[in-house]
Image (spheres, rainbow, N blue to C red):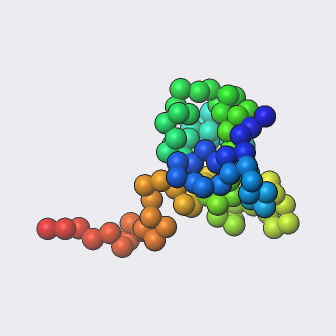
Amino acid sequence: MPSNNCAVIGCDTKYTDKHIIRHRFPKDEETCGVWVQKSGNNNLLNKSPLQIFNYYIICEKHFDASCSTPGFKKLIRGSIPTLNLPGYSSGYSLAKKKKSN
């Protein structure tokens, strides 16, 4: 049974947050690896995709609304967490980054 706590480092979603949707990690190795990288959770690096699928989740706070079909809880296949991730500012954009001299 997967954990009820979000695997993303710094996320405060806990088992008591019943209104928050939780998504299992994908089983396929490539997409699972991207989710692990985005989560910033180094504890997941030595686990297989199946172990991660069975025991870890990422909550809805890390997915754009376009990642799910309105009225459904399930993510669209291939969705990647992009919001509220460790090391990323929500307002950061490559276009806004200025080169310093």
Residue 22: x and y in percent read 74, 51
Whether residue 82 is situated above or below residue 98 in the rendered picture? above
Residue extending farthest to the front is 16
Tell me if I can see residue 63 in this picture. no
Identify the image quadrant of residue 96: bottom left
- Extreme right residue here? 71
Residue placed most toward the observer, 87 or 11: 11
Residue at 49%, 67% (x, y): give it.
Answer: 90
Compared across the picture, whether 81 is left or right of 68 comes to left
Residue in view at x 44 percent, y 64 percent: 89
Q: Residue at x 67, y 46 (%)?
A: 5
- Residue 74 seen by the camera: yes
Image quadrant holding the N terminus, namely top right
Residue 77, percent from left and from top: 73, 50
Q: Is residue 38 above or below residue 21?
A: above
Q: If the image is split into quadrants, where does the C terminus sit?
A: bottom left
Residue sitting at 62 percent across and 39 percent down?
Answer: 32
Percent coordinates x, y for residue 23 in the rendering: 73, 49
